Amino acid sequence: MTTIPQLSDEAAARWLAEHRSGVAPEDALAFFDGLPTVPAADMLGRWRGSGLPTGSRLDGLLEAYGWYGKEFTGAESVHPLLFADRRGRPRPVDPAWIPLPLLRDHAGLARLWPVRTAFGRLRPLLYTNEPKARLRTIDHRGVSTAAMVYDALPIIDVFRRIGPDVVLGAMDMRGLPAPFFFLLERETD
């Protein structure tokens, strides 16, 4: 296997600044592969999330629903989906209630305002204080790096380092033809 030279934090930040508004999926994957790995312990904390548009059918969908980010409190204690409540505070949502096949196969329906409005009204019923994912180190695309494994969904989010407080995530979801890319920026209170 060929070793890909890893980008420095400065080079990664420049690339991201140039491509934050959108990039071809193959370019995002090449960028991902060129980033350093992330030790699982470096993921601890609360992270603010945003998508990296690549033309995925999931682009912008999480943000349309008020996605806040993720929180890692330990290897066995991860809140994979934080959404802003009515006051803007991050609250963990149980992803087991999310209709994954609908989102994966019919993302256009999920973008409709009646569906978003219904989710907004039901979201308080989906809040949980129980962790719904685990933090692991896995082998992915030839390297070992931090990943978040959902408890109830066929999804693994794999992470690579852009900088000390910024990571690029690649959501590997069964049935999705290409990874969905997103950014996480650590909250530093």
Image (spheres, helix red, strand yellow):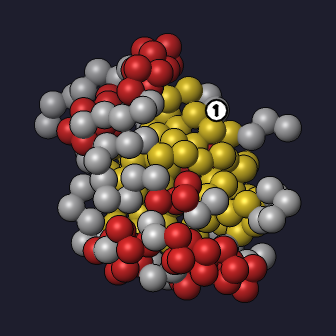
Residue 6 at x, y percent in the picture = 35, 23
Name the image quarter holding residue 94: bottom right
Is residue 94 found left or right of 155 in the rendered image? right
64 or 13, which is in the foreground?
Answer: 64
Residue displayed at 85% across by 38% down? 189
Residue 125 image position (x, y, % from top left): 72, 85
| Residue 140, placed above or below residue 177 | above
Q: Is residue 163 above or below residue 141?
A: above
Whole-percent x, y for residue 29 in the image: 27, 39
Q: Is residue 160 visible?
A: yes
The residue furthest left is 1
Instruction: Answer with left or right where residue 25 lies relative to residue 151.
Output: left
Numbered marks: total? 1
x, y percentage for residue 182? 46, 46
Q: Is 128 drawn above or below residue 86 in the view shown?
A: below
In the rendered image, which quarter contains the N terminus?
A: top left
Instruction: Tell me the residue that label 1 is attached to.
Output: 165
Q: Is residue 109 above or below residue 10?
A: below
Q: Between 158 and 127, which is closer to the camera in this rendering?
A: 127
- Between 147 and 106, the one lying in front of the other is 106
Amino acid on which the number 1 mark rests in the picture? Asp
